[in-house]
Image (cartoon, helix red, strand yellow):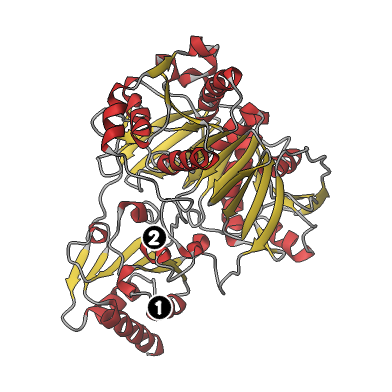
């Protein structure tokens, strides 16, 4: 079983998140591996452990600081770390990013076939959930998204997905791109031995040229959208906080009625 | 003239309210045409789409378009001439438009709170980072796709109705690698689905698993019942009710958080709501940082009194 997991370097949810020149501000201090990618790493490790053989690759795309994301994956136990680091990648939209990731996946797949690419359900900065679909289309692999259960047998992957209107079971032949939700598993914590090993573990760094991707096909220049304005929203004004001394329920009702909400 | 194709969401043959909101938004961008996937709509449904401005109702009678690639092909066949495509932003439609954009070269903005045409280009508005930032994004590509969140546009009928003429569109669905093995419909509780509800009353750990009061208040306010991750993890209420970044994102006019501390994941799924009310025993609960009206107290004391007072004033 050979699996590649994509991990994204995103600002910590608890940090002050912001935009700089139309892009999400990412710093080494506040950045981490996207929390939802932990479920993807866990899924990959469990599948390889259950199969009793195999390897897990973690791949990230981004500037020099993004290496923090694959270091975190190494701490969790993945075997190989890959980092596509190239100035030209900055400002890519989802389609440019998919192109770059697909090129990296194909490079590994060309060395020895991969069975799966596993991703988180969304990145907690952008939250669009579009990358897994774009990647599957770019690779022309099977697309199995939003898995809350995942099994692999007889050259096929099968997932369950919980949508607003239905619970579906979907199967598709390998290789497949699978995105997983936070319902799928309970991610492990890094252990001391792996944390120490992750510090010294080698990270393979590739540029777009190494992947044979034309710089004009990725990055801000290829993006189909441009952020023209980003501004912090003002905090809510005139907030009221009361401590219940016996009539707070009545006060709340009056507030709702005055606002035309009840 | 800009042609704006709107992918209509329908349930049991009826047009959903977010679809009417999307048509209303589409009218501000150009001339709307409705795209209807599935069995042909009733005359009433088509007439209603016309009232909200649809000049045509393009019907693609696909029996099964559950897979993103199939639905994208169907939508693409019916929106070939459109400069702008508007869908209601859900996990499913986001996959459909991604597929469609891969084949058409369209630029996409999802989870939008609105859109307008500026200098001939579509600009979409979003709130991000748990609704703490506003972002305006221009779609540079020739074809623009916008996924719009429910409750972000007020649905209003058009001043002059569109004809709503039904036009059948045929499509050859692509071979897909994926196969839907089984589909179990989720039993919908009565009333409006969570994402579309104008009012959401949510209960968390503080309910101790008892949703009686939360449901009663939701009913009284014409809203839907939500929950925190804690409550769904405890098995007190099903996952479909979970409000948060990995559950349902809601933007109702009124959000009432009962016994919910307001972890960042929960806030990310509701912070863009109109008015936020919080009831919590803990005066330091982070939910109070974003509440327009906060009550430090027990929901078991506060909610019955609120219900009684509203009933009393309505009766008066």
Circle on res. A187: none
Give the left or right position of residue B311, taking residue B21 as reference.
left
The Cα–Cα distance between marks 2 and 1, rounded to whole angstroms, is 20 Å
Q: Residue at x 31, y 81 (%)?
A: B306
Of labels 2 and 1, earlier in sequence is 1
Q: Residue at x 42, y 32 (%)?
A: A78
Residue B42 in percent (x, y) is at: 78, 64
Whether A114 is drawn above or below B310: the answer is: above
Please state the chain letter of the residue tagged with numbered disc 2 in the rendered image: B
Labels 2, 1: front one:
2
Whether B115 is drawn above or below A169: the answer is: above
For disc 2, the marked residue is: B229
Q: Secondary structure at mark 1?
A: helix
Whether B21 is drawn above or below A89: the answer is: below
Given contact means CB atoms under 8 Å apart, are the residues at marks 2 and 1 in contact?
Answer: no
Q: Quadrant of residue B260?
A: bottom left
Q: Nearer the viewer, residue B182 or B193?
A: B182
Q: Secondary structure at mark 2?
A: helix
Q: Quadrant of the C terminus of chain B?
A: bottom left
Q: Nearer the viewer, residue B77 or A87?
A: A87
For disc 1, the marked residue is: B217
Residue B127 in percent (x, y) is at: 39, 45
Q: Are marks 2 and 1 on the same chain?
A: yes
Report crowding for label 1: few under 14, some 14 to 19, many 20 or more residues within 10 A (C-alpha).
many
């Amino acid at each position: 079983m050979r699996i590649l997991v994509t991990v994204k370097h995103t600002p910590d949810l608890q940090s002050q998140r912001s935009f700089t020149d139309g892009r999400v501000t990412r710093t080494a201090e506040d950045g981490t591996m996207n929390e939802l990618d932990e479920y993807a790493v866990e899924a990959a490790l469990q599948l390889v452990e259950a199969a009793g053989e195999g390897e897990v690759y973690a791949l990230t795309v981004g500037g020099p600081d993004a290496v923090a994301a694959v270091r975190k994956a190494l701490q969790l136990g993945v075997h190989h770390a890959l980092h596509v680091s190239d100035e030209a990648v900055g400002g890519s939209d989802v389609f440019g990013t998919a192109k770059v990731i697909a090129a990296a996946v194909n490079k590994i797949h060309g060395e020895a076939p991969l069975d799966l690419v596993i991703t988180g359900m969304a990145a907690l900065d952008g939250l669009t959930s579009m990358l897994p679909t774009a990647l599957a289309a770019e690779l022309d692999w099977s697309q199995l998204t939003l898995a809350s259960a995942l099994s692999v047998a007889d050259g096929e992957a099968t997932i369950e997905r919980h949508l607003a209107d239905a619970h579906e079971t979907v199967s598709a032949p390998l290789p497949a791109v699978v995105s997983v939700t936070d319902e799928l598993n309970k991610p492990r914590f890094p252990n001391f031995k792996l944390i120490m090993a992750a510090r010294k573990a080698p990270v393979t760094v590739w540029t777009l040229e190494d992947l044979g991707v034309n710089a004009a096909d990725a990055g801000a220049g290829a993006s189909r959208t441009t952020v023209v304005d980003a501004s912090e929203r003002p905090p809510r004004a005139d907030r009221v906080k009361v401590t219940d001394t016996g009539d707070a329920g009545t006060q709340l009702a009056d507030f709702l009625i005055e606002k035309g909400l009840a | 003239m800009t042609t704006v194709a709107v992918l209509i969401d329908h349930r049991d043959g009826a047009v959903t309210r977010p679809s009417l909101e999307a048509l209303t938004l589409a009218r501000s961008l150009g001339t709307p045409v409705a795209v209807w996937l599935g069995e042909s709509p009733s005359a009433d449904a088509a007439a209603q789409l016309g009232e909200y401005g649809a000049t045509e109702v393009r019907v693609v009678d696909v029996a099964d378009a559950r897979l993103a690639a199939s639905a994208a092909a169907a939508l693409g066949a019916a929106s070939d001439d459109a400069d702008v495509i508007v869908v209601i932003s859900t996990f499913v439609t986001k996959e459909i438009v991604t597929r469609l954009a891969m084949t058409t070269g369209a630029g996409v903005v999802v989870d939008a709170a609105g859109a307008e045409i500026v200098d001939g280009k579509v600009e979409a508005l979003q709130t991000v980072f748990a609704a703490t930032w506003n972002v305006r994004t221009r779609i540079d590509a020739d074809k623009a796709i916008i996924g719009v969140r429910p409750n972000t546009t007020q649905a209003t009928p058009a001043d002059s109705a569109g004809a709503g003429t039904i036009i059948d569109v045929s499509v050859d669905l692509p071979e897909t690698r994926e196969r839907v093995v089984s589909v179990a419909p989720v039993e919908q509780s009565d009333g409006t689905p969570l994402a579309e509800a104008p009012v959401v009353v949510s209960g968390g750990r503080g309910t101790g698993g008892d949703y009686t009061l939360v449901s009663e208040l939701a009913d009284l306010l014409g809203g839907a019942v939500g929950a925190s991750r804690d409550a769904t993890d405890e098995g007190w209420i099903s996952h479909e009710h979970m409000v948060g970044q990995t559950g349902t994102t809601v933007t109702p006019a009124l959000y009432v958080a009962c016994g919910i501390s307001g972890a960042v994941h929960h806030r990310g799924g509701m912070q863009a709501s109109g008015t936020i009310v919080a009831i919590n025993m803990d005066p330091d609960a982070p939910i109070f940082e974003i509440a327009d009206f906060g009550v430090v107290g027990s929901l078991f004391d506060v909610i019955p009194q609120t219900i009684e007072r509203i009933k009393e004033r309505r009766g008066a």
